[in-house]
Image: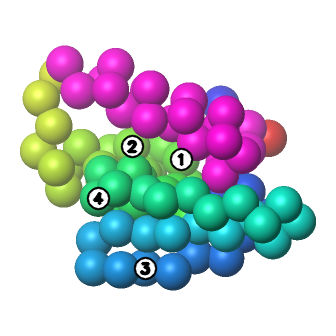
């Protein structure tokens, strides 16, 4: 799985959260702190490294894998990320 942030999005970072604009539709997406962190990590490091870094930074327990998978699935569904 090669997941990347969707191209052509504009991101405004506010503290530890973010707002992402889809300019072609005008839709705004509000990302809470965990979603914004994962979004930024994917953008900076790529998906595989982002997962490792996210778990390290949040000190995620082993049960957090399912929540992280749901978070990434939501990003794909909302077109914030793409699976190349």
Residue identifier under label 2: 51
Residue identifier under label 4: 33
Can residue 45 be seen here?
Answer: no
Task: Bin the neighbour count of mark 1 within 10 Å (Cα to Cα): few under 14, some 14-19, many 20 and up.
Answer: many
* C-alpha separation, residue under disc 1 versus residue under disc 4: 18 Å
SS for callout 2: helix
Quarter holding the C terminus is: top right
Q: Are marks 1 and 4 in contact (CB under 8 Å)?
A: no
The location of residue 58, given as percent across then percent down, is: 16, 49
SS for callout 3: strand
Is residue 46 magenta-colored?
no
User: Image height check: is 74 above or below 8?
Assistant: above
Residue identifier under label 3: 13
* C-alpha separation, residue under disc 1 versus residue under disc 2: 6 Å
The location of residue 23, given as percent across then percent down, is: 81, 71
* C-alpha separation, residue under disc 3 versus residue under disc 1: 20 Å
């Amino acid at each position: 799985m090669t997941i990347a942030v969707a191209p052509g999005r504009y991101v405004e970072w506010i503290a530890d959260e973010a707002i992402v604009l889809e300019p072609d539709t005008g839709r705004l997406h509000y990302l809470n702190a965990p979603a914004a962190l994962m979004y930024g990590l994917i953008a900076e490091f790529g998906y595989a490294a982002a997962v490792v870094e996210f778990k390290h930074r949040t000190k995620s327990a082993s049960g957090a894998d399912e929540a992280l998978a749901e978070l990434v699935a939501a990003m794909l569904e909302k077109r914030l990320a793409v699976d190349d």
